[in-house]
Image (cartoon, rainbow, N blue to C red):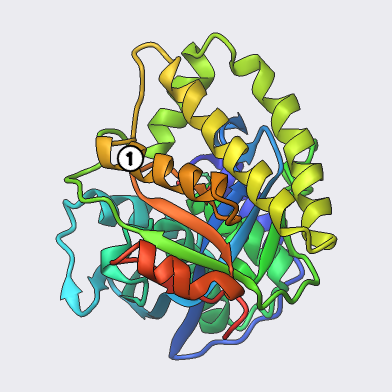
Amino acid sequence: MSDLQHQFVKNILLRASHGANEQGRGFAPANIALCKYWGKRDQELNLPLNSSISISIGEKGTLTEISRRSSDQFFLNDQLIDDSNIFSKRLSLFLDLFRNHCRAPGFEVRTFNTIPTAAGLASSASGYAALVLALDDLSGWQLDRKKLSMLARLGSGSATRSLFSGFVVWYAGIAKDGMDSYAEQLEINWPEFKLGLIKIEHNAKPISSRIAMQKTVETSPRFNEWPKRAASDFNDIREAILEYNFDKVGQLSEENALEMHALMNEAIPSINYLLPETYSQMKKINDIRKNGLPVYFTIDAGPNIKLLFQKKHIDYVKDEFNSIEIINPFGD
Ligand code: PMV
């Protein structure tokens, strides 16, 4: 990791407390973006070009346990991960930022995902958020969630938002040192707001979101329109959430996701995560809506669909989408 990243971590930990536990533990939920983060203003500090908004998915996420060792060893759902694995390499690099601060040459990291395996959700967001919580517990730093969100950001951008439950905003900030780019929870309790995960069968991702994002920034001819568009979506979606305006949240979120995918499609060479089955499910959702039922969707860097709907329509949704996995972000 770079000097800049080491300095950033040092700044965050400057006034942290110090304790030392044998083991640290942390849990963080996965999150689904309604206003997407797409494009960085700083690669090293993982600073976004635009602010984003997500919804965390309750008790579905990652539980991580960490202890000091002489060298690194990582387990995923009790299975030892080979250190040549890309996941291990990324994790080791991230942990390099913390070895001195934690007085540990190596770490044993045990990660358990409670994200439904069939749901096709990315686990890096909840993974890095749970990891910084576990590091904080191990070293007794007692950092607040805002500071932890900034540390998680260095692992994966979307991890910034996984330190909180419910609706979460991540501010892009403007400061060069990245100290004003953090996440915060919106004080909203909206049990009517439901999500449904529609898994589309596919093999490995054609391209990682990290690379796809960069290629879009560099080659998509209309990308210069995105930061302004995303900033206005961010304000409008946040306002619609604060007004509990389901239709407005759904409509704007769907349009925001479609614009992100359109920009990717226009990149050179074109990037397309959507599969024929994704398109037919999108059409189906549109048709249902034309028939008067307010259901909307969002899609991240993959083919799977996340349906946005209201509790009062749950029976209809279950009937229409057979294998849908229902998520209750605010409980039943
Ligand atoms: O955190 P990353 O680098 O995996 O990027 C996440 C990108 C999207 O999931 C497509 C959008 C978002 O805001 O989560």
Q: Position of residue 263 (x, y in %)?
A: 51, 22
Is the residue 220 above or below the residue 169 in the image? above
Q: Position of residue 172 (x, y in %)?
A: 73, 41
Q: Residue at x 72, y 28 (%)?
A: 229
**Of residues 283 and 106, which is closer to you in this image?**
283
Label 1 sits on what residue type? Answer: Ser
The crowding category of the residue bearing disc 1, from other C-alpha atoms within 10 Å (few below 14, some 14 to 19, many at least 20), is few
Residue 281 seen: yes
| Drawn side of residue 315 relative to residue 332, left or right | left
**Which quarter of the rendered picture does the C terminus lie within?**
bottom right
Is the residue 161 above or below the residue 269 in the image? below
| Drawn side of residue 73 relative to residue 219, left or right | left
Could you say which quadrant of the image residue 311 lies in? bottom right
**Of residues 161 and 148, which is closer to you in this image?**
161
Q: Residue at x 59, y 12 (%)?
A: 222
Instruction: Give the residue number, with chain letter if any, for mark 1.
Output: 280
